[in-house]
């Protein structure tokens, strides 16, 4: 697994992390075993950043238990990121303390979908100053909220942004990536394989695409092709795909390491998607 520096955090992170939306929301003993296996598979491939949220059902709980079961109690080993979705300081305090109880520790704490950010972001800055968290982030799944992200970043508080970016959803390339580079912000990509409102749409488009020329670059399926494209196009972003399948973890993370896609393969793919 290749690594990247996550902006001004200075953290050395795997160039592909692990998302937990849906995939870690699993009940019971069997569900916990499945989540622990997913954590182990990611770690075995070199992933060292896990992103979760209170709004992802049991994901915080199952991730926290997996980290404890595997003896991964040292800060940053791996990096644990979560979110807060509250509209005032008091609500944020309650939710964040619950996240601490479930996860044990939090390295990156993010505003989820920019909810109440004007009230809550200063509180996250206080937690960072106290050393309870190491970094602050802001997130949103909708390009329509990019204006709010821009305003929040200009306060100087966020260290990281988490945004949608994939082969058919590229507004962030025009607006947020230049700002992130200007301010040395880390960039996590929440939808590297499928747009949130078009589940299956991108993969369906790629169903007939010839993957053979891409195999030498670690690509084995349409999902890993999407990840390889993103890594090749932007050397300073960290995609965090979520999957409930250990086999998919392995195929996704296999695209890290080989050289970037050459320009001719990038162009072929982008022209195919553009139609």
Image (tube, rainbow, N blue to C red):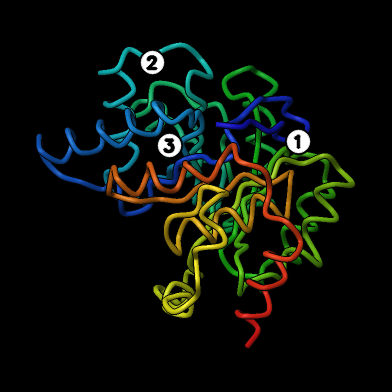
- Neighbor class of circle 3 (other Cα within 10 Å; few <14, some 14-19, many 20+) is few
Left or right, 74 with respect to 32, comes to: right
Q: Where does residue 149 sit, x and y in percent of width and height?
A: 72, 58
Q: Where does residue 84 sit, x and y in percent of width and height?
A: 50, 45
Residue where numbered disc 1 is placed: 7
Looking at marks 2 and 1 on the same chain, the residue that comes earlier in the sequence is marked by: 1
Q: CA distance from mark 2 to mark 1?
A: 24 Å
Looking at marks 1 and 3 on the same chain, the residue that comes earlier in the sequence is marked by: 1
Q: Residue at x 56, y 58 (%)?
A: 214
Q: Residue at x 16, y 41 (%)?
A: 31
Left or right, 155 with respect to 261, comes to: right
- As drawn, the label of residue 166 is none
So how many labels did they put on this image? 3
Q: CA distance from mark 2 to mark 3?
A: 25 Å
Residue where numbered disc 2 is placed: 72
Q: Quadrant of residue 271?
A: bottom right
Pick the quarter of the image with the C terminus.
Answer: bottom right
Residue where numbered disc 3 is placed: 94
Q: Secondary structure at mark 2?
A: loop
Given the current orientation, which residue lies at the most extreme left position? Answer: 29
Q: Nearer the viewer, mark 1 or mark 3?
A: 1
Q: Residue at x 69, y 41 (%)?
A: 160
Looking at marks 2 and 3 on the same chain, the residue that comes earlier in the sequence is marked by: 2
- Neighbor class of circle 2 (other Cα within 10 Å; few <14, some 14-19, many 20+) is few
Given the current orientation, which residue lies at the most extreme bottom position? Answer: 275
Q: Does residue 73 lie above or below 192 as drawn?
A: above
Q: Residue at x 25, y 33 (%)?
A: 37
Left or right, 32 with respect to 110, comes to: left
Q: Nearer the viewer, mark 2 or mark 3?
A: 2
Q: Nearer the viewer, residue 131 or 197?
A: 197
């Amino acid at each position: 697994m290749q690594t990247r520096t996550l902006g001004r955090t200075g953290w050395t992170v795997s160039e592909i992390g692990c998302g937990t939306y849906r995939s870690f929301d699993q009940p019971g003993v069997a569900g916990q075993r499945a989540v622990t296996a997913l954590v182990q598979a990611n770690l075995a491939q070199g992933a060292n950043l896990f992103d979760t949220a209170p709004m992802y059902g049991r994901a915080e709980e199952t991730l926290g238990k997996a980290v404890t079961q595997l003896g991964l109690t040292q800060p940053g080993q791996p990096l644990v990121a979560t979110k807060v979705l509250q509209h005032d300081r008091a609500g944020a305090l309650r939710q964040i303390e619950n996240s601490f109880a479930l996860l044990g520790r939090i390295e990156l704490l993010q505003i989820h979908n920019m909810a109440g950010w004007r009230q809550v972001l200063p509180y996250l800055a206080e937690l960072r100053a106290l050393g309870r968290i190491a970094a602050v982030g802001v997130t949103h799944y909708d390009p329509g909220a990019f204006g709010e992200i821009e305003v929040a970043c200009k306060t100087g508080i966020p260290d990281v942004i988490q945004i949608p970016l994939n082969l058919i959803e590229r507004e962030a390339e025009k607006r947020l990536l230049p700002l992130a580079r200007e301010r040395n912000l880390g960039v996590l990509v929440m939808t590297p394989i499928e747009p949130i409102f078009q589940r299956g749409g991108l993969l369906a488009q790629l169903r007939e695409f010839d993957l053979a020329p891409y195999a030498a670059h670690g690509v084995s399926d349409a999902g890993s092709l999407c990840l390889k494209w993103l890594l090749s196009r932007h050397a300073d972003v960290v995609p965090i795909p979520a999957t409930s399948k250990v086999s998919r973890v392995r195929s996704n993370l296999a695209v890290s390491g080989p050289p970037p896609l050459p320009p001719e393969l990038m162009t072929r793919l982008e022209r195919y998607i553009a139609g």
